[in-house]
Image: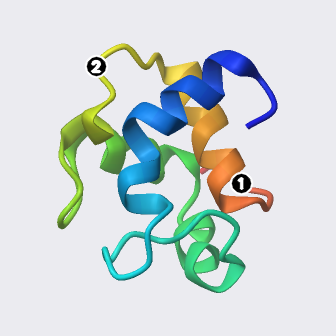
Amino acid sequence: PSDAHLAQLYASSCKACHGQPGTGAPLVGDHGAWKPRADKGINELLKNVALGYKGMPAGGQCFSCSAADYRALIAFMADQPIPEK
C-alpha cells in the first residue's frame, strides 16, 4: 500500500501469506483468486478476517488493525471493487 501505516500493517501481518505463493491465501493483485471472494461482499470478507477462515487465523494476526485498516488492506490486496453486501 502507498499509505505508510497500511504498508507497515501489510508487511507485518498480511504479507506472510498473501505475498507468498503456495500458502493457500489469495495473493495480492490476483484478480482471479480475489473475484469470488469480492463477489461475497466486504461484510463477509470482514467477518472472515475477524473470525478467521480456513487456514487464516482470526484477525489475520494483525492485533492493532481497526475495521478501517482491514477494509483498506482487503481493497489493496484484492485490487478490485468489493461491493457493500
Task: Determine which quarter of the picture holds residue 54.
Answer: bottom left
For badge 1, the amino acid type reads: Pro
How was the colour assigned to the protein in this rendering? rainbow
Figure check: 12 above or below 49: above
Residue placed under numbered mark 2 in the picture: 63
- Alpha carbon of mark 1 to alpha carbon of mark 2: how far? 25 Å
Q: Position of residue 77 (x, y in %)?
A: 63, 54
Figure check: 18 above or below 35: above
Q: Earlier in the sequence, mark 1 or mark 2?
A: 2
* Residue 79 visible within the image: yes
Q: Position of residue 79 (x, y in %)?
A: 76, 59
Mark closer to the observer (1, 2): 2
Q: Residues within 10 Å of mark 2 (few under 14, many from 20)?
A: few
- Does residue 61 appear left or right of residue 82 in this picture? left
Figure check: 33 above or below 70: below
Q: Residues within 10 Å of mark 1 (few under 14, many from 20)?
A: few
Q: Position of residue 1 (x, y in %)?
A: 73, 37
- Does residue 37 appear left or right of residue 3 in this picture? left
Instruction: Give the camera-side residue of 49 and 28.
Output: 28
User: Which residue is pictured at 60% across the width and 39% down the height?
Assistant: 73
Q: Position of residue 3 (x, y in %)?
A: 77, 23
Residue placed under numbered mark 1 in the picture: 83
